[in-house]
Image: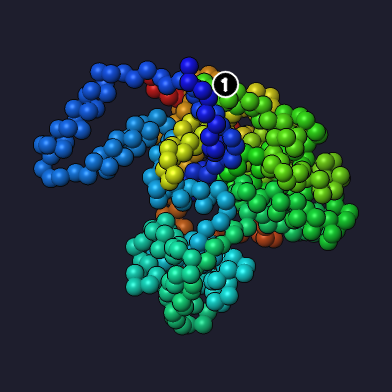
Amino acid sequence: MGQKIKIAGWVSVGVIAGALTTVSLQTVARGAMTPLPLEEIQQLSAVFGLIKTDYVESVDDKKLITDAISGMVSSLDPHSQYFDKKSYKEFREGTSGRFVGVGIEITQEDGLIKVVSPIEGSPAFRAGLKTGDLITKIDDTAVKGLSLNDAVKRMRGEPNTKVQLTILRKDESRSFPVTITREEIKTQSVKGKVIEPGYGWIRLSQFQERTVDDFVRKVEELYKQDPNMKGLVLDLRNDPGGLLDAAVAISAAFLPPDVTVVSTNGQLAESKETYKASPSFYARRGMGDPLQRLPASLKKLPLVVLVNEGSASASEIVAGALQDHKRAIIMGSQTFGKGSVQTVRPLGPDTGLKLTTARYYTPSGKSIQAKGIVPDVMVDETPEGDLFAALRMREADLEKHLSSGQGAEVKDEVREKAREEARKRLEEEAKKPPAERRLPEFGTEKDFQLQQALNRLKGQPVMVSKTLTEREPEKKEN
């Protein structure tokens, strides 16, 4: 029997705008190789040979092998993936919260790239870019027609290289070029403020390496501003997940010591694990307990957690743990439903394999795979209702998604009808000026769900959704 080899790996519990985020842990490879099916391997070899000799033009050996590996892995489920050199680098950047670029949060509007916010202290911030600026060109490439991902790739690059952005600033009725030198950017995954005396709001946009430390600092800031905190809103809306140890730590910040936060189960012995609200499960080696500085009163502070269809994986772990232990009221709409764990194993110095290795379960033993966390109180995103939530993708919509493993899945006819109605509304909204069709920014006074969360903390009436109901998981055909 072969000796077990320890390798550094990551366990993924997140989804980011179509890309996947990760969880940093040590993993152990299987000691013995599974016997190979020789007949099928011979067929693969024969196909490779035929392509090399008979195809209309020459094909690179490395491309054939890489595409074969990618096809094999992608046939399993939506979250298993082969990383080539480029995608492996991007993947690792996504988990660290660091990347090389200009330092702006962006969105797309009318085919152009719109600056949502320059990251404080970044090259873009120092160059004077403002919220609302439109980017019309990146170097010599017109932005019109580019996807958001393509625009991001063009703005990223190597440190100390330059990129020229052409900016349209509508309120000044002018267009001008700005040359920016790229540098390493550290993204902020934690925002927060005292929204009114006694009540705080903390938003986590992703679970990254720095999230726990930033969370602790933000809590300290809020208590310094208002030592008499009466309640807190933890905002996990549109948080696609990230690092598992960060999710365990955030849960532990509010839970009693040593209670179960999440458990996992799969084929490997190493995938059968229970994670508890204890520093041994989230403290980085040699760094001590990052939660020690938190005020003791945080454990008892009344808490509302806001979630929606964009809350996935690591955020669902936090919401599920706080819900099962009755530590918080979960409000909003049903979450994404990614309840699977991915382990990333390096295949060399710059390639890797991300493979689904387990399902995870809330403390009460529920799998949320392809279902999600059902809020205690359903609240629409606007006073008029959840206008476009039905159009948002969820785990059960993904092709080849893993089943929950806890009973049959049923097709949701009501959701399909809601999607059709939402599509029609979206067509009508698209005819309005952009300023009129945008949903309010999270954390503002016009944030309807946040206002309902505040009402709940203050014991005031909450406008509960009249349309949202628990989703039935989609039936998988045999």
The quadrant where residue 257 appears:
top right
- The residue drawn where x is 75% and y is 56% is 218
Q: Is residue 279 left or right of residue 205?
A: right
- The residue drawn where x is 51% and y is 23% is 3
Residue 50 x, y percent position in the rendering? 14, 32
- The residue drawn where x is 34% and y is 20% is 36
Residue 48 x, y percent position in the rendering? 20, 33
Q: Is residue 5 left or right of residue 205?
A: left
Residue 176 x, y percent position in the rendering? 44, 81
- Which kind of residue does numbered mark 1 sit on? Ala
Residue 275 x, y percent position in the rendering? 68, 30
User: How dense is the environment of label 1, judged by Cα within 10 Å: few (below 14), some, or many (20 and up)?
Assistant: few
Image quarter (top left, top right, bottom left or bottom right) of the C terminus: top left
Q: Is residue 111 above or below residue 231?
A: below
Q: Nearer the viewer, residue 289 or 294?
A: 289
Element class at badge 1: helix
Q: Is residue 28 above or below residue 107?
A: above
- How did the renderer colour the structure? rainbow
Can residue 320 be seen here? The reply is yes
Q: Nearer the viewer, residue 361 or 66?
A: 66
What residue does disc 1 label?
A: 269
- The residue drawn where x is 55% and y is 31% is 6
